[in-house]
C-alpha cells in the first residue's frame, strides 16, 4: 500500500455500525485495520458509524467495543462516533449548497429511482436540479427545523446525471428522519447518509488508509469527490484519506449476514447471540475459540481483492493450533462404562501422574487417583472387536494411560444386552513412569477416571451450525473454496474481483445441522471442577473444551466443546 503521501503515517479505523453483534467477518476487518496500524507504528480508531438513528443502540456499542478488546486490540483514546461530526457535516452541506454543488430534491423516492437511469442509460435531471442557492438554503434549513415530514425532501449533491457510475448521479446526502438518536437525542431530524458521512469522518480523523469491503469500490469516486471539493474549499486538510477495498470474508457452513443472524436468534434456532454455535464474537468466546486463533486465521487467509470462500476447517484448524499450544490436558469420560480391576485390593488407592502438557514439561504434572473401580469410555470396549481394534475386548491387553497395563477377563450385561461392567486384571509391574514399565508393549492406550473420585459435569458438544457448506443456496464451483490458506498478498496487487456464486436462495434454515448441539452428563477429573469460567483444556482423545462463561460452577461444572481434535467433516461431508 502506498504510504508515501502520508510520510509513512498509517492511521486506520474500524467503523462498525452499532446495530448488532460483531461476527467472524468483522474479526477479519478488525485484524486488518488494527494489524496494519500496529505494524507501521500507526493507530487505529474505533468509530461507531451511527448515522441510522432507528436501528442503533448503546448496548451494541458496548458489546462491539468489548469484542474488539477481546481480540487483543486497543484504540487508546481514539473512540469516536460519526454523530460527533453532525454539526460539521451540516455546515459542510450548507457549503455545498452555497457552492451550487447541492440542491434540495422534492421528488418522491420512487420518482428519483425512476429517473436514476441504468448501467447503459444515463439518468434524467430532476426538475428541482436548477433550484437557486437561496431557495436551497432556505429549504434545507427548514428541513433541519423540522417543518417537513419524513421523505418530503432530501439533499442531493449536484455531480453528473450522465456519469457511467450510478453513485455519481446526484447522490442523496441528507434525509429527513423524525427519530431520536441514541447519542444526539432529538437534536436532529435530518440525518446524513453513509457515503457523505464516511469519507468526511475519515478526513476529519486524518485517516490515511480507509479500508472497506469490495462492494464499496464503485463508491470510491464519490468518496474522493466529496473530500476533494471540501479540501479545495479549505474545509478539510490534506493529505486526504485514500480508500482501499478488500474481499469480505465468506465462510462455509455458516451465515454472516446480519439479517440472517437476527432471524436465527429471533426464531429460537439458537440460544441467543452468544450461543457458542453463532458466528458472532460473543458466541466464539463462549465456544472457547481464542483471540489468538482469530489473529492466526486472519493472517493465514490474507487479504485479497477477489471474493472467495474460505472453508470452515481453516478457521477450526487455527483454533486447534492455538489451543494445542496453550490448553492444559485433562481427562474426561463422556460416555462411561465401569471397569473393575479384580486383582486390585478393594479400598486401596494410589496416585498416577499425568503431564499437564506433553510439549511443555515445565507446566508440571498432576495426580490422578487410581483404584479398583474405574470409568472408561463405552467405545473403548468391544465384545466382538472389528479388525484393527486395539482397545479392550475379551482377552486383550491395553495400557490405562499414565497407569497400568490391564487384561480384559470378562464383562457383564443388563437385560437389554448393554454392557454394564468390564472386568480385568492389572499387572503391578507396568506402572507408567516406573523402571521397566515400557518393556511391556501393548497397542491400545485408553483414558480412565477413578469411579470414586470422578466428578459429574454437563458437557455441551457443539458442532457446525449448518450441515451444508452454503446454507440456503446451491454450491458455487468447488474450486472457489479455499481449503488450504493462500499466501496473503497486497491489496494493491490488482487481481480480478469475481463475485462469489450468487445462487437462487432456498431457506438457509432448512440447512441447520440437527446435531449442532448435544448436551450430555459426563465425568471429569476432580481438578476440572475447580476450573475458572473460560479456562480452556484439551480433554484427552476428545477435543478442546472451555468452562462455560455463564453457567460453569465448581459444584455444577459445565464445559463446552470448542472443536474436536481432528476434522471429521472433510471426509464425511
Ligand atoms: P451488514 O451489512 O450485514 O449489516 P456490515 O458488514 O455492514 O453488516 P458494519 O458494522 O457496517 O457491518 O461493518 C463494520 C466493518 O466490518 C466494515 O468496515 C465492513 O467492511 C467490515 N465487514 C463486515 N462484514 C465483513 C466480512 N464478512 N468480511 C470482512 N469485513 C467485513
Ligand atoms: Mg454496513
Image (tube, grey):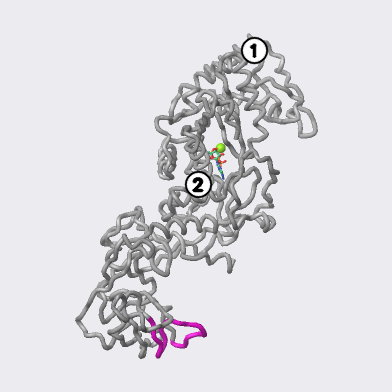
Query: Label 2 neighbourhood size at 10 Å, few (<14), some (14-19), many (20+)?
Result: many
| Left or right of 459, for residue 244 | right
Query: Label 1 neighbourhood size at 10 Å, few (<14), some (14-19), many (20+)?
Result: few
The circle drawn on residue 525 is: none
The residue lying at 50 percent from left, 28 percent from top is 82
- Main SS of the magenta part reads loop
Between 72 and 8, which is closer to the camera in this rendering?
Answer: 8
- Residue 319 appears in view: yes
Between 57 and 310, which is closer to the camera in this rendering?
Answer: 310
Give the residue at mark 2. Answer: 23
Disc 2 within 8 angstroms of ligand 1 (CB): yes
Count of number-bearing discs: 2
Q: Position of residue 445 (x, y in %)?
A: 40, 77
Give the residue at mark 1. Answer: 99
The residue lying at 59 percent from left, 17 percent from top is 231
The C terminus lies in quadrant = bottom right
The N terminus lies in quadrant = top right
Residue 147, above or below 150? above
Is residue 93 on the magenta stretch? no
The residue lying at 19 percent from left, 81 percent from top is 347
**View quadrant of ligand 1:** top right
Amino acid at each position: 500500500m502506498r504510504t508515501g503521501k502520508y510520510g509513512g503515517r498509517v492511521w486506520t479505523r474500524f467503523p462498525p455500525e452499532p446495530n448488532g453483534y460483531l461476527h467472524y467477518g468483522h474479526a477479519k476487518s478488525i485484524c486488518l485495520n488494527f494489524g496494519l496500524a500496529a505494524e507501521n507504528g500507526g493507530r487505529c480508531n474505533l468509530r461507531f458509524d451511527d448515522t441510522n438513528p432507528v436501528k442503533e443502540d448503546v448496548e451494541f456499542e458496548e458489546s462491539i467495543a468489548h469484542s474488539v478488546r477481546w481480540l487483543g486490540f486497543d484504540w487508546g483514546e481514539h473512540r469516536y462516533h460519526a454523530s460527533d461530526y453532525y454539526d460539521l457535516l451540516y455546515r459542510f452541506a450548507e457549503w455545498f449548497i452555497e457552492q451550487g454543488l447541492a440542491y434540495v430534491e422534492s421528488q418522491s423516492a420512487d420518482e428519483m429511482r425512476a429517473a436514476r437511469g441504468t448501467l447503459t442509460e444515463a439518468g434524467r435531471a430532476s426538475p428541482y436540479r436548477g433550484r437557486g442557492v437561496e431557495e436551497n438554503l432556505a429549504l434545507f434549513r427548514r428541513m433541519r427545523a423540522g417543518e417537513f415530514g419524513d421523505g418530503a425532501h432530501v439533499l442531493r449533491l449536484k455531480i453528473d446525471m450522465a456519469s457511467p457510475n450510478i453513485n455519481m448521479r446526484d447522490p442523496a446526502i441528507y434525509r429527513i428522519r423524525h427519530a431520536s438518536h441514541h447519542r444526539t437525542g432529538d437534536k436532529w431530524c435530518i440525518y446524513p447518509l453513509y457515503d457523505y458521512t464516511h469519507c468526511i469522518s475519515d478526513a476529519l480523523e486524518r485517516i490515511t488508509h480507509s479500508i472497506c469491503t469490495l462492494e464499496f469500490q464503485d463508491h470510491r469516486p464519490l468518496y474522493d469527490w466529496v473530500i476533494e471539493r471540501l479540501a479545495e474549499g479549505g474545509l478539510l486538510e490534506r493529505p486526504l484519506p485514500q480508500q482501499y477495498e478488500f474481499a469480505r470474508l465468506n465462510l462455509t457452513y455458516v451465515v454472516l449476514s446480519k439479517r440472517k443472524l437476527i432471524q436465527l436468534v429471533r426464531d429460537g434456532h439458537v440460544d441467543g447471540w452468544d450461543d457458542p454455535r453463532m458466528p458472532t464474537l460473543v458466541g466464539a468466546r463462549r465456544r472457547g475459540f481464542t483471540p489468538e486463533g482469530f489473529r492466526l486465521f486472519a493472517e493465514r487467509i490474507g487479504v485479497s481483492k477477489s471474493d472467495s470462500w474460505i472453508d470452515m476447517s481453516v478457521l477450526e484448524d487455527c483454533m486447534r493450533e492455538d489451543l494445542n499450544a496453550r490448553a492444559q490436558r485433562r481427562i474426561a469420560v463422556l460416555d462411561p462404562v465401569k471397569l473393575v480391576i479384580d486383582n486390585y485390593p478393594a479400598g486401596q488407592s494410589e496416585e498416577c501422574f499425568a503431564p499437564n502438557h506433553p510439549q511443555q514439561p515445565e507446566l508440571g504434572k498432576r495426580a490422578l487417583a487410581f483404584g479398583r473401580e474405574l470409568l472408561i469410555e463405552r467405545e473403548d470396549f468391544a465384545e466382538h472387536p472389528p479388525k484393527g481394534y486395539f482397545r479392550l475386548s475379551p482377552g486383550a491387553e491395553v495400557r490405562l494411560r499414565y497407569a497400568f497395563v490391564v487384561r480384559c477377563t470378562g464383562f457383564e450385561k443388563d437385560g437389554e444386552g448393554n454392557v454394564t461392567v468390564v472386568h480385568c486384571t492389572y499387572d503391578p509391574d507396568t506402572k507408567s513412569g516406573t523402571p521397566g514399565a515400557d518393556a511391556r508393549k501393548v497397542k491400545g492406550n485408553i483414558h480412565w477416571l477413578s469411579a470414586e473420585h470422578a466428578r459429574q459435569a454437563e458437557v455441551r458438544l457443539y458442532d457446525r451450525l449448518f450441515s451444508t457448506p452454503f446454507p440456503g443456496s446451491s454450491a458455487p464451483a468447488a474450486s472457489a473454496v479455499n481449503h488450504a490458506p493462500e499466501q496473503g498478498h497486497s491489496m494493491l496487487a490488482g487481481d480480478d474481483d469475481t463475485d462469489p456464486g450468487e445462487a437462487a436462495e432456498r431457506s438457509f434454515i432448512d440447512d441447520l445441522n440437527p446435531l449442532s448441539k448435544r448436551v450430555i452428563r459426563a465425568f471429569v477429573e476432580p481438578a476440572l471442577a475447580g476450573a475458572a469460567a473460560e479456562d480452556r483444556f484439551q480433554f484427552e482423545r476428545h477435543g478442546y473444551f472451555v468452562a462455560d462463561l455463564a453457567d460453569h460452577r465448581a459444584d455444577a461444572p459445565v464445559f463446552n466443546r470448542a472443536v474436536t481434535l481432528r476434522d471429521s467433516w472433510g471426509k464425511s461431508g
